[in-house]
Amino acid sequence: MRRHGLLVIVCVLLCLLAVAVPVHAESLRLTGIPSPVIPGSLSQISFEASAAMTLDIMVLDSQGVIAAVIAKGYEASAGTTTLGWDGLYFGEPITPGFYHLVLSGGGLSDMGELTVDESHAIFTQVMLHSHLISPDSPLTMDIAASHDATLVYSLFNADNRYILGSCPVGQESVTVVWKGFSDENGRLTPLGDYTLELTLRDALTHEDILSEHYAVQLVRNDSSDVIGKSGETEKETITAESYEEPPPVFTPAHLLEPHCQDKHCYWSTPMDITNEAAVWEMLMAPMTVVKGNQRRQIRLLSEPDEKSALVGDVTCATQSVHVLGTLDNGWSYVETYSSSFHDSKIKAWNALVRGYVKTDQLEVKEPGNKEFGIVVDKLTQRLYIFRNGKLIAELLCSTGLGTARQPYNETRSGEFFLISAVGEFASDNLHCPMAIRFNSGDLIHEVPHIDNADGSPNFRTTEPKLGQRASHGCIRVQRVKNADGINMKWIWDNMYRNIANKTVKLAIWEDFPGRQIPLPSADTILYYNPNGGSNYHLREVCSAVRDKFLPLTPFRYGDFELPEYKKLTACPNCCSIRRPEDIRTINEKNAITD
């Protein structure tokens, strides 16, 4: 638990202040102190002030050290004010014990005793994969809690309540899937709008601790009427035993309620690189960005109020925000992936967040370069170059490797402008050439190298990692030319050197659980050198193969298991197509399991 040190003298000074300035009912007085406070449950704090004033509300331990800051610089109105507090500080429960609740400001103060009990279990993660539920898209959610508890999940509307099931949850995230379309008593759940209720139940006492609610909708398949409006089976009942989940179509908004009606929007465009027309329309669509310098960030707020909680970081000038609504009071409600870096107080590492920003801080900008667009897919670890509506190249790349120790290394998803050419920069002992900034400290650049003793570049520690996560947040791109002569230097030369308008749009796709890499057709033709060659190639001529072995010999992708092709590996120059077993390994790792 984070605490800011404070000398005992602070508590003494507050007591002296209370003596020097008598506290009366008509000045400043605590009128309601919750006792005990149970972290994870909302408690109410009440006070009276004779006039509007700015207040600090803190919890001090017996040594006068700050245990929690409930509000700092709170603008209180005259009269009675009631605040809610959940007993958490920076998202962590306050340690059980005895404390002082201190209210101070405007030369006035008041203090009361406060008892904190053991905390209840609270949700630390609730992620719905979709708010639309159908036989083709079951209710799927990732759940974690601060303590071991039982999760009870149910649907209710004005007419009925359906208990769907229960399962144990704890600190490790679990994926819960409901796909039977009947409750635990076997009753069919009719189509329509519902409230999904998630309740944590104490694992020992079996008492309900807290509940959270989400709006969901049960719909029938696009292709068949499976469940009737009255709840009767029209063709067949989809049950947990008979259900077979088809591959879903993923968009960047697949975890959100459907709300974007613009089919060219980043959030509604399917993450399917083969759909060239849709991807190109998305890459050419305008972006809403926050005004300001590209190295500056602003913070999204939980409410349209500058004193409300912080929910995410947004980089000015380069990072897109999706505007969900504009209010009459000068605020806009937006969503984006938080660009919190290692030094951010918010610690929302690549979290998909929604919050408020002042409307006059926003502006809509078109991509300056209408010839090129780039997509980076974190699932495939590939960079795709589009030119005038066509996919012209697929290059190996490495995005950020986020770990439990360094989660801030995750490359942020979303859409960005490649806005400024930085050139070469150093990261520890690594040299990173041809860097182009897209998100504050994150850049796209050639795969880095170290220097040999003679000054020549050495790529042995970084180049083998292309095609997998490896960076601190930047996007590393292959230096070796592919079959069409395209590499990072080609990007630098064609998009940034001697070009007047350099704002190319970059879209980064998230590797949501459940996304899968499709296997190439078994009839896809690849090439190899039967005279001892160890690589397979995309074309019958490759610059990595000596002329005497050209042209290369063709074989089918579906024949990889035959003895002569079993040990072939992808050519690092020309071929970014993975072997079938490598694709299956990635898909199994990214699959959603019950």
Image (spheres, grey):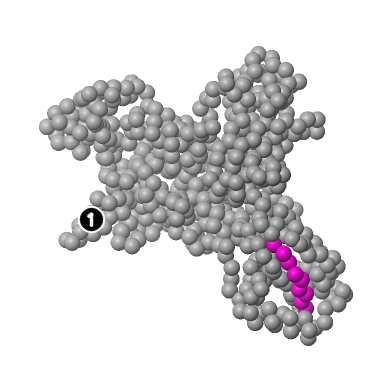
Report whether 428 appears left or right of 240.
left
* Residue 136 x, y percent position in the rendering: 58, 25
* Residue 184 x, y percent position in the rendering: 68, 28
Report whether 577 appears left or right of 59.
left
Location of residue 264 with respect to 210 vertically, above or below: above
Q: Is residue 540 visible?
A: no
Look at the image and say whether residue 115 sits in the magenta stretch.
yes
Q: Is residue 414 visible?
A: yes
Q: Secondary structure at mark 1?
A: strand
Q: Nearer the viewer, residue 576 or 134?
A: 134
Task: Name the residue located 42 percent from the left edge and 50 percent from the top edge.
Answer: 400
The residue beneath circle 1 is 457
- Quarter residue 178 falls in: top right
In the picture, which quadrant includes the C terminus? top right
Main SS of residues in magenta: strand
Look at the image and say whether residue 245 sits in the magenta stretch.
no
Task: Name the residue located 78 percent from the left edge and 65 percent from the top edge.
Answer: 33
Q: Which residues are magenta?
A: 108-116
Report the amino acid beneath label 1.
Pro
Task: Name the residue located 44 percent from the left edge and 42 percent from the top edge.
Answer: 378
Report whether 505 appears left or right of 454.
right
